Image (tube, rainbow, N blue to C red):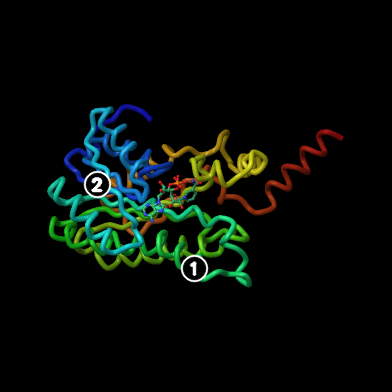
Amino acid sequence: MGTATGRLTGRSALVTGAGSGIGAVTAELFAREGAKVVVADIDETKAAQTAERIREDGGVGEPFAADVSDEAQVADLVEFAVASFGGLDVLQNYASERSLVGRDVFVADADPSVWSRQLGVDLMGCVLTSKHALPHMIRAGGGSITNATSLAAWLSLEGRPAYATAKAGVIGLSKTLATEYGKQGVRCNVIAPGHIVSPATEKMYSARQTEVMLDHVSAPRLGRPDDVALAALFLASPESAFVNGHVLVVDGGMSAYAPMVPSFRRLAADETRQ
Ligand SMILES: NC(=O)c1ccc[n+]([C@@H]2O[C@H](COP(=O)([O-])OP(=O)(O)OC[C@H]3O[C@@H](n4cnc5c(N)ncnc54)[C@H](O)[C@@H]3O)[C@@H](O)[C@H]2O)c1
């Protein structure tokens, strides 16, 4: 991921969902770039493992186990970050409820408990962490919040409506936060990964489905967690001081083309073979 240049030196960061995948790689990158990082995850063991990797790498990382859908736990998490590092400058929300895949089905069969958990973690998690982080950021004169959405927010996956709705809500929430708190120096942006190979997506998609993903990326390879982490670093760092309310798509061009392009490619390949 290149040589660290201290782009977050002196900053205190809180990363949720940092026990795995994109959140873990982001927490590790931010620590390498000089941030002191609270590694938050509902999975205590995974949070501890990420924090351990940060320390082995010479960085500062403190694990904290919390369920982001529970306000009391979020309040404790933010207080822990502020008490550990004397403030909170950067908030990164990657926590996502992945266990509902298969139960988040077509709307005619919707299970309200599935919807409430998906929205509770993926959307309300961003609301609650922001709610508790904002007073500290405002008091310090500013901060940067980045929330993870998905292409699913505007390109239907057909069959994961609660996830799509939660991720669409993240965009509305983030633009509102950008507007409400921008004058006080707090920026809020959104990161929208396309298909990124992570422990979650490796479980979610078969090898053949992953091949289809590659077919739909306008890049020579699939996305990696560090592709997203590097974009998140820009949004967290002072280099993006005037970027607020933006949705940064990191998808290798997956959402850039007209829907018929892959079919045209296949037709052209068939014609070449004939
Ligand atoms: N990987 C992709 O292709 C992809 C694509 C689009 C969007 N995203 C988004 O990026 C983010 C990270 O995705 P990933 O693939 O790295 O996921 P992941 O499943 O590897 O990581 C998510 C982490 O969130 C934690 N978590 C789950 N529920 C929680 C809760 N209630 N409180 C706190 N932590 C909780 C999990 O334990 C896990 O460590 C997610 O928000 C996801 O929706 C990912």
Residue at the (49%, 41%) spot, across then down: 199
- State if disc 1 and disc 2 touch (CB < 8 Å): no
Residue where numbered disc 1 is placed: 113
The amino acid type, in three-letter code, at marker 1 is Ser
Q: In this view, does 32 lie above or below 147?
A: above
- Label 2 residue near ligand 1, CB within 8 Å: no
Q: In which quarter of the image is residue 270?
A: top right
Q: Which is in the foreground here, disc 2 or disc 1? A: 1
Horizontal and vertical percent for residue 183?
21, 64
How many residues crowd mark 2 within 10 Å: few (<14), some (14–19), many (20+)? many
Residue where numbered disc 2 is placed: 13
Horizontal and vertical percent for residue 191?
41, 51
Q: In which quarter of the image is residue 138?
A: bottom left
Q: Is residue 14 above or below residue 273?
A: below
Most distant residue in the right direction: 274
Which disc number belongs to residue 273?
Answer: none
First in sequence: mark 2 or mark 1? 2
Horizontal and vertical percent for residue 160?
57, 60
Horizontal and vertical percent for residue 187?
27, 57
Specify whether 178 is left or right of 266: left
Instruction: Count the numbered circles shown.
Output: 2
